[in-house]
Image (cartoon, rainbow, N blue to C red):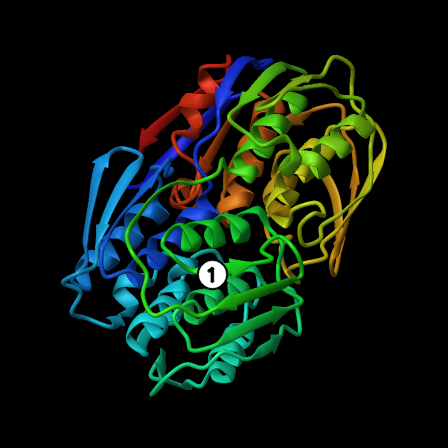
Amino acid sequence: MLEELIVYGKRKLQGEVYVSGAKNAAVAMIPAAILSNDICYIENLPYIDDVISLSDTLNEMGVSCEFVDRHTLKIDSRNMNNFCATYEAVKKIRASYYLLGALLGRYKKAEVAFPGGCNFGTRPIDQHIKGFTALGADVVVEHGMIKARADKLVGTKIYLDVVSVGATINIMLAAVLAEGTTIIENAAKEPHVVDTANFLNSMGAKVKGAGTDVIRIVGVKELSGANYMIIPDQIEAGTYMIAGAITGGDVTVHNLIPKHMESISAKLLEMGVDLDVGDDYIRVIAKDRLKAVNVKTLPYPGFPTDLQPQMSALLSVADGTSIITEGVWENRFQYIDELKRLGADIKVEGRVAVIKGMKSLSGAQVCATDLRAGAGLVLAALAAEGKTTITNLQYIDRGYEEIEKKLNAMGAEIVRVKK
């Protein structure tokens, strides 16, 4: 059954919101759990479609995945009997490629269909394959399947040609049970890379340097089960911070790590937002119309590409002209035409968007083109006059747990309806 969100705009958000666990950490740790021939419990999981899809995929592969409660998953891979993830199993989720590293690491063989998920440009997995090959695997692509085999995996030095979160994590997964030492140079430093390394270490792996650009992995013979609580979601936290700002509201975002939010906090301060930063919360207070700023997305600790659409929505109603430069993906402005339906004045050339702030946006029917674009449209709708209808909610539900309920609790008026 298709659903849509109806958003009634021009309501200042006031109150508190609690951030769920990190989606991007969750989708790496669920495959990582199969590296252990034991039972893992992962806590603070967001209850979102990506997490449910991955657990369903593992169940089909002979793993017992069971939600102990809404946010805790028990993963028992002792009876795993299938090393192939078909297209039907992985078509909805990009992070299914982590099954490659996990299967290769534990079983020395893996077959995974090319992943699905959001489409905002080519996201090659050549760096993943480069890493697997360097560790000693033979990798071929045929009939839409990525097939990897190895007699054994042996540690080596791997330099990533581009900073890639996916490749960094996938190589870590393959290397923790390899013989000898693996060194990943030019590694990604995102918080969920660090969290995945910490999870692997809680299982008995020896991973050092996560959070820097050089990660050193000393292979071990086996991993044990573990209980692990994942970090809060940096992108969800940023989304709600921007929601407070775009509505001229007063919002306290709880259960975040302020260090992870420094790039977005700096831009909001530059725009004229008042911030009260605590140990695990940030209060966002926006009274006057905010000022235009320039933003360039970069790998962590730079401004996250996953907050670019939300920031575009905010800059659409800022005072002055802003420039957003996309420094990570080559085609992440597909949603701009949808923002224009709401009255935004934006011109795009290549990786650069020039945004002339309007005093107000106006409600319209729009369509989410990917996960974060969907969140950006929800934020724009909050600031728009009248009613906005947002379709393609399957994208939003991939990464946000009950987004309308969390926003409504702070004074938004959003209704989810079946079409």
Q: Residue at x 62, y 52 (%)?
A: 211
Residue toward you, 390 or 114: 114
Report x, y in % for residue 68.
Answer: 21, 36
Query: Image quarter for residue 405?
Result: top left
Image quarter of the C terminus: top left
Circle 1 Cα neighbour tier, 10 Å, few/some/many (<14 / 14–19 / ≥20): some
Left or right: residue 97 versus residue 17 is left
Report x, y in % for residue 280.
Answer: 57, 24
Find numbered disc 1 in the image and state the secondary structure of the residue it sits on: strand
Left or right: residue 108 versus residue 161 is left
Task: Give the vertical position of 37 relative to 354 (above or below).
Answer: below
**Can residue 290 be spotted in the picture?**
yes
Type of amino acid under label 1: Lys
**Can residue 316 be spotted in the picture?**
no
Report x, y in % for residue 332.
Answer: 62, 55
The residue that disc 1 covers is 206
Query: Image quarter for residue 162?
Result: bottom right
Report x, y in % for residue 313.
Answer: 66, 35
Q: Residue at x 38, y 45 (%)?
A: 394
Residue toward you, 214 or 366: 214
Query: Image quarter for residue 274?
Result: top right
Q: Residue at x 54, y 77 (%)?
A: 126
